[in-house]
Image (cartoon, rainbow, N blue to C red):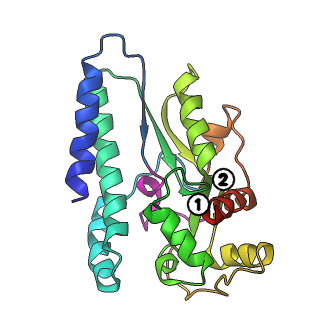
Amino acid sequence: EILEPAVKGTLNVLGSCKKNPSLRRVVLTSSSSTVRARDDFDYKIPLDESSWSSLELCETLQILKMEIGCVSKVWYALAKTQAEKAAWEFCNENKIDLVTVLPAFVIGPSLPPDLCSTASDVLALLKGETEQFQWHGRMGYVHIDDVALCHILVYEHEGASGRYLCSSTVIDNDELVSILSARYPSLPVPKGFEKLDRPCYEFNTSKIRSLGFKFRPIEEMFDDCIESLVE
């Protein structure tokens, strides 16, 4: 339900792009989960675009996640990694100028009234629930407007190439709820989370910043998100 549509869907679109003789560049939305799902890195060195998630680790972790009811989270990382790898292989073979954007956990206003899984997780957190966020642990966050602007930047910038991490702030769950509870004291934000034995990491976003990009802070992301949820 997740892996096959992700890979085949990506290749179907690229197959159509190949038919366009005036095509100059394709920008693909990937995910930071294609970078951070691994356990063999030095936590003192921030992860950058040269890092790839381990397919073997993702496949192994799905067994554990099945036990706690979070299967989709693992399949998502695996699907995104497989789809981006397939895209790079296809574009290299067909001489297509591909640029990929790797957003972190996207926060901000929603366009549709029906919430996506990410927004639903955030809403649950703001209502005092911890189950959905427990597995996230340490996570990068980015404003949805920054994700859109990042796509436009690498689409228009002639010198853009390769992969681009798109993340403003990387923090642990406990740090996040500390910020949220102080900023929104009227909301029943959880006090803390169970500690998970997971590697600590940071993101090196100097590549996109070198093009002049500046990210919004986490406070602005959640201000806009909460305003949208209230509306």
Q: Is residue 205 left or right of residue 124?
A: right
Could you say whether the residue bearing mark 2 is in a helix, strand or loop?
Answer: loop
Question: Measuring 49% from the left and 52% from the top, which residue is drawn there?
Answer: 112
Q: How many marks?
A: 2
> Badges 1 and 2: C-beta atoms under 8 Å apart?
yes
Q: Which residue is mark 2?
A: 168
Q: Is residue 101 left or right of residue 225?
A: left
Question: Measuring 37% from the left and 68% from the top, which residue is drawn there?
Answer: 73
Q: Position of residue 135 (x, y in %)?
A: 47, 77
C-alpha distance separating marks 1 and 2: 7 Å
- Mark 2: give few (<14), some (14-19) or many (20+) Cα within 10 Å: many
Q: Position of residue 108 (x, y in %)?
A: 62, 55
Q: Position of residue 184 (x, y in %)?
A: 76, 74
Q: Which residue type carries mark 2? A: Ser
Name the image quarter holding residue 98.
top left
- Mark 1: give few (<14), some (14-19) or many (20+) Cα within 10 Å: many
Image vertical order of residue 216 relative to residue 67, above or below: above
Image vertical order of residue 111 relative to residue 139, above or below: above
Magenta region, mostly helix, strand or loop?
loop
Q: Is residue 200 left or right of residue 112?
A: right
Question: Measuring 28% from the left and 40% from the top, which residue is drawn there?
Answer: 10
Q: Position of residue 132 (x, y in %)?
A: 47, 77
Mark yes or no: residue 45 visible.
no
Q: Which residue type carries mark 1? A: Gly
Question: Measuring 79% from the left and 77% from the top, which residue is drawn there?
Answer: 182
Q: Earlier in the sequence, mark 1 or mark 2?
A: 1
Q: Which residue is mark 1?
A: 140
Magenta-drawn segment:
31-45
